[in-house]
Image (spheres, rainbow, N blue to C red):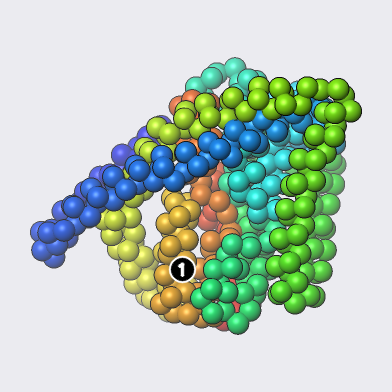
Amino acid sequence: MALNYLWIAFFLIAFIVALLKLIFLGDTEIFKLIVDGMFDSAETSVMNIALPLAGVMTFFMGLLNIGEKAGAINFLARIVGPFFNRLFPEVPKNHPASGQMIMNFSANMLGLDNAATPFGLKAMQSLQELNPSKTVASNAQIMFMVLHSAGPVLIPLSIMAQRAIYGAKDASDIFIPCLIATYVATVTGLLFVSFKQKINLLDRVIITWLGGITAAIGLLLWYLSSIPKEQIEIFSKVSSNMILFGLIISFLLGALRKKVDVFDAFIEGAKGGFETSVRIIPYLVAMLVAIGALRNSGALTWIVDGMKYLFALTNINTDFTDALPTALMHPLSGGGSRAMMIDTMKTFGADSFAGRLACVFQGSADTIFYVIALYFGSVNIKETRYTLWAGLTADLAGIITAILVSYLFFH
């Protein structure tokens, strides 16, 4: 219901802002800009997101079917079972959904977005099979969505590449702040959902796993902070893609060992990839068109200017407000926030405080509205319950942390 009202509000706010611009500023182009943007967003949803996703989905859904028949998914489920059984008590022990979720999280952490999405959609479908109410998000689906949307990317390679393009002296200097911000966002999302679902976070297994993950991230931070940025980029490219390709090879070899008809298994699983891509189109169009209308109306610009004014009244340092457009756009549109990040670097410089902070904002969490539309749309979930508020709370924690660590590192 919250998402329903929010979706309507996007259009109403865009209309009111456009009307004010027409009446008081004489902007006769504003409604044309909004309508043209709506058509562009609708086309982008299908041509630039859903259809390109179909090919990737077809391949990885086929690959996942091979992995399931080879026993690889169940193997992963057994490894993470003790931890996931606490976070996802509705999911039976050794259920394939556990392995699929851990593959999604792993691909996200490695920055392999194209691989993470099919793994995540497959996990959502498996969780939907366990869902007693098919149109209402289950506890397990909500936990998965919030952890996915806030989940950390260990090395934000695409952001570092953009910084290099715009002349940053050290393109990787935002790496540690990004990882800290996204880790805080993830923990916040986990705490929010655990509180709502009455999950005992003091359980020994949960504490051990979270402590181990924290230690592993700390060790990685220590290692990567001690090597030149060129080696960080090489380490990221080689390790991420080698792990993904190694996963593919392990699925194939495991299937051969079990005498699985590999090609037929691939075709069987791949058939669901295109169907899933088509099924999510209405949800993507609905959300991205509404976001496009809000963005093109100039409402976000007014909000940022208003926030700058309010923060200025408090006599605190307001340098961070120049990067706020990226933070405000990020929950709504990944492409829009990336454009804001680039614009901030163009305007203030890649090595300016605002330019660096915008990059940290971009790397602090995923796009919650897009994630909800994509994943819940793939299984026809209508009632998302508190997923949106949990995701936005995690995103807010990431934004606040990004500001604090950027002042610490760069100001």
Residue found farthest to the right: 257
Please report the residue visible at 67 percent of the width from the left and 30 percent of the height from the top: 62
Please report the residue visible at 56 percent of the width from the left and 38 percent of the height from the top: 55
Above-or-below relation of 378 to 177: above
Q: Name the residue nearer the viewer: 225 or 13.
A: 225
Residue 269 in picture, x, y percent from top left: 65, 25
Residue found farthest to the top: 132
Type of amino acid at the residue the image marks with label 1: Ile
Query: Horizontally, is 345 left or right of 292 in the view?
Result: right
Please report the residue visible at 66 percent of the width from the left and 68 percent of the height from the top: 175
Residue 169 in picture, x, y percent from top left: 60, 82
Above-or-below relation of 190 to 227: above
Read off the residue under disc 1. 342
The answer to whether any part of residue 180 appears in the image is yes
Please report the residue visible at 19 percent of the width from the left and 57 percent of the height from the top: 30
Query: Horizontally, is 39 left or right of 315 in the view?
Result: left
Q: Name the residue nearer the viewer: 329 or 304.
A: 329
**For the residue carrying disc 1, how many other residues have a C-alpha within 10 Å: few (<14), some (14-19), or many (20+)?**
many
Residue 305 in picture, x, y percent from top left: 33, 68
The answer to whether any part of residue 404 appears in the image is no
